[in-house]
Image (spheres, rainbow, N blue to C red):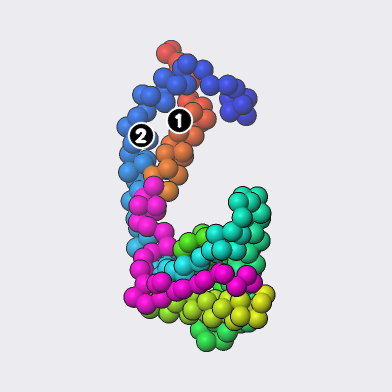
Amino acid sequence: MNFILTPASPDDIIRLLRAWRFWVLGAILGALIGAAVYWIAPPPYRARATVNVDFNLEQAWPQDTDRQQFYYLEREARKLEELAWHDEIVSRLSSVYAVPVEDLRGGKLQLSQPAEAGWHFYADDSDPQVAESLASAWATAFVERAQAEIGEGHFNQFIKLEATQSTDLPKERSISLSGYLLAGATGYLMLAVFVVLFIKPKDTHIS
């Protein structure tokens, strides 16, 4: 225990440098393990739908009041973000795709860039077509509900929404192969460094 808690000495650094073959080999082995995990249990596919949100600040606040524009943008963006996760929308998706609401809100659906311009609606699934359909349905349902809310006066009338990407969506693995390779190599490197620095070498005595 004392050996582990002892601060690193120049000799420890020298031992670490001399063991470069060991930790380079560990990095390679770690990357191979990461690749094996990727092929044996690959991450789900992720599809992305895009909705363009235009708050039309120049019409909503024609006077030069930057502070008011900032709070207006923040307030309306937050309200729209909450609308994207509205019980009615999520429950409808849950019913159509037979996915529990807890799973949809727990990471299967993800919302990115909740501000002005493009909002990205992500959906993960082991089947790329299901991921695409789910992302498209979520984005479309959001636009329809938001437009209805704007028409009823619950949002500023100058807000405009348009689903700019809802068909033929880009689909790729949620985590790339390079991510697995990097994680495996980094993990094995850390293990190799730990072994070299914190496992006390046996003392050798010449009799």
In this rendering, the count of numbered labels is 2
Q: For mark 1, give the secondary structure.
A: helix
Could you say which quadrant of the image residue 206 lies in? Answer: top left
Q: Residue furthest front?
A: 63
Mark 2: give few (<14), some (14-19) or many (20+) Cα within 10 Å. Answer: some
Amino acid type at circle 1 is Val
Q: Residue at x 45, y 44 (%)?
A: 187
Kindly indicate whether the residue at mark 2 contacts the one at mark 1 (C-beta within 8 angstroms): yes
Percent coordinates x, y for residue 101 in the rendering: 61, 77
Quadrant where the N terminus sits is top right
Q: Nearer the viewer, residue 121 or 65?
A: 65
Whichever of labels 1 and 2 marks the residue nearer the N terminus, that label is 2
Vertical side of 59 occupied by 155: above or below: below
Amino acid type at circle 2 is Phe
Vertical side of 43 occupied by 21: above or below: above
Q: Decide if residue 108 is in sight here.
A: no
Percent coordinates x, y for residue 112 in the rendering: 51, 61
Q: Which residues are magenta?
A: 155-182
Quadrant where the C terminus sits is top left
Q: Is residue 11 magenta?
A: no
Q: Which residue is mark 2?
A: 22
Q: Is residue 174 magenta?
A: yes
Q: Residue at x 46, y 17 (%)?
A: 11
Q: Which residue is mark 1?
A: 196
Q: Residue at x 43, y 79 (%)?
A: 133
